[in-house]
Amino acid sequence: MEIDAAASGAMLKRERVRDAILELIEARHPGDAIPSERTLCSELGVSRPTLRAAVDELVVAGLLVREHGRGMFVAAEKITQELVADQNTFSLPRAGGVWTSRLLEFSTLPAGARVSRKLRISPAAEILYVARLRLVDGSPVAIEHLHVRTDLAPGLTRGELEQGDLYEHLRDRHGVQVHEAVQSIEPTVVTRAEADLLDVPELSPALLFERLTTDTRGRAVEYVHSLYRGDRYRIVSRLTLSGGDAQPAPKEGHHHPGIPPGDFTGGDPVTLSTRGVVQHDV
């Protein structure tokens, strides 16, 4: 499969505009207005269609609200539910199929305000920004945007990002042992540029992953957000529920994801294992 240079360039530009608008959103409160499209185009130096594509994505994601004749406003905060709490266990076996990567962007640049907050470094500190298309058995499944601290992994190569497991490269070649990751997952749809790369129609359903990984010394190593095709990728979880005598009911408002409150009694922890499943073409 050939990568369309125009589609790749449009995706990267839209990604940078999206990050700039996200900074505006994160600096405001729900209901606050953000600058008009005309003002943002001028400040960011981009065309109206490029800006509108990024804004449309954030509206669909529920982060912005458009009000006709009034402008754009920060949306109400989303309800957040933690997937695993306390000392419950979590494992993530490899997904099926043969996974390969194709680089769309590989560059060293300043972290900037938003990414530096994620990685807990100076905005002027250098990071390696990598956009890569993930393929399974030769078919595109996901687009990943990686932000890796260059001071922890100097000399990380293109080859290491295209072949093998990044965490294994960090451990074996750079002496960085990843230890913990906090990851969120939410539904979204693909933009036109993303649709071209993933070979799906525009506005197709997708899963948006956001992950912050730290090492054994507590240092933030990478910040990643990824877009997975909704028609090819799904999450399967196995829950091992405590047995034996009934335990006291959990506190009101607290329950395990996917299990309505009151379906099971609380007490012993629930063991959870999760795996990614790729839907193969038929």
Image (cartoon, rainbow, N blue to C red):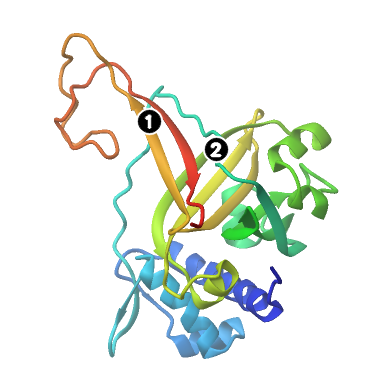
Which of the labelled discs sits on residue 181, or is there none? 2
Crowding near the residue tagged with mark 1, few <14, some 14–19, many ≥20 C-alpha atoms within 10 Å:
few
Which of the labelled discs sits on residue 127, or is there none? none
Foreground residue, 136 or 117? 136
Does residue 150 show up? no
Q: In this image, 33 relative to 4: left or right?
A: left
Residue 73 placement: quadrant: bottom left
Question: Which residue is found at the position 56% from the left and 76% from the top?
Answer: 193
Question: Which residue is found at the position 85% from the left and 48% from the top?
Answer: 155
Residue placed under numbered mark 1 in the picture: 238
Vertical side of 119 occupied by 244: above or below: above
Residue 139 screen position, x and y as percent: 61, 60
Residue 95 screen position, x and y as percent: 55, 41
Foreground residue, 118 or 128? 128
Vertical side of 203 occupied by 178: above or below: above
Q: Nearer the viewer, mark 2 or mark 1?
A: 1
Q: In this image, 209 relative to 79: left or right?
A: right
Crowding near the residue tagged with mark 2, few <14, some 14–19, many ≥20 C-alpha atoms within 10 Å:
some
Question: Which residue is found at the position 47% from the left and 83% from the top?
Answer: 52
Residue at the far front in the pictured view: 282
Q: Earlier in the sequence, mark 2 or mark 1?
A: 2
- Real-space Cα separation, disc 2 to disc 1, in angstroms: 20 Å
Q: Secondary structure at mark 1?
A: strand
Badge 1 amino acid: Arg
Badge 2 amino acid: Ala
